Amino acid sequence: MATRICPACGKAEGSNARCRPCRDAAARELADHARDVTVESLGDRAAQGERFAERPPWYVRFAPLQLVLQVRLLAAALRDWRSGAYREIPWSAVAILAAALAYVVSPVDLIPDFLVPVGWTDDLVVLAVAWRTVKQQLRAYCAWKGLTAGRYGL
Ligand SMILES: [Zn+2]
């Protein structure tokens, strides 16, 4: 999605958090991917997120700390949902979170974002959209898990 130019702001589509059409493009992308999320895939997705956050690939050094923290939180939430420890997040929200995690983690395995001009900006927009959509549930999850929600931008 980062290769198209946004007609509204002139930047790579989906890369500008302050641009409504960019946020809408990111939301559509998330919704598309969320439809493909299965319960069975949550364990693998959580593991991917944990690797990304705990043993970051070298190029993650260029990512904002907030992004790494958010990936860690997503991985924990998916892991706890998968195991049945915490199921207060409805499936539709879990699917959005799993899609956001995959979006941030997977593409960098193929083309490090830092090698393309948009850097991490499109990942941050996707996370911002997911955060907006699932904010209440993530806050509740943090409270249950004993985490400080503000640390994760909630
Ligand atoms: Zn735009």
Image (spheres, rainbow, N blue to C red):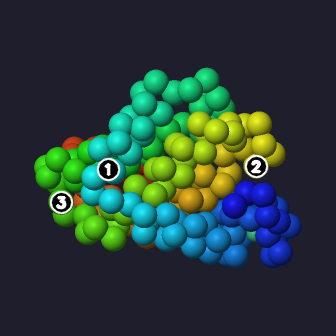
Picture coordinates of residue 77, whole percent (x, y)? 29, 50
Q: Residue at x 69, y 39 (%)?
A: 111
Reading the image, the residue beneath label 2 is 118
- Measure how far apart labels 1 and 2 are at the Cα level: 28 Å
| The CB of the residue at mark 3 lies under 8 Å from ligand 1 | no
Is residue 7 visible from the viewing direction of this image?
A: yes
Picture coordinates of residue 150, whole percent (x, y)? 40, 50
Reading the image, the residue beneath label 3 is 87
Q: Is 4 left or right of 55, judged from the image as shown?
A: right
Give the position of the C terminus as an image quadrant.
Answer: bottom left
Reading the image, the residue beneath label 1 is 42
Reading the chain from its start, which is encountered first: label 1 or label 2? 1
Q: Amino acid at mark 1?
A: Leu
Q: Amino acid at mark 2?
A: Val
Work out whether residue 86 or residue 36 is closer to the camera in this orientation and state it: 36
Q: Is residue 128 above or below residue 146?
A: below
Is residue 142 visible from the viewing direction of this image?
A: no
Q: Amino acid at mark 3?
A: Arg
Q: Residues within 10 Å of mark 3 (few under 14, many from 20)?
A: some
Dividing the picture into quadrants, the one containing residue 61 is: top right
Mark 2: which secondary structure?
Answer: loop
Picture coordinates of residue 69, whole percent (x, y)? 45, 40
Q: Quadrant of ligand 1?
A: bottom right
| The CB of the residue at mark 1 lies under 8 Å from ligand 1 | no
Give the position of the N terminus as an image quadrant.
Answer: bottom right
Q: Is residue 47 above or below residue 40?
A: above
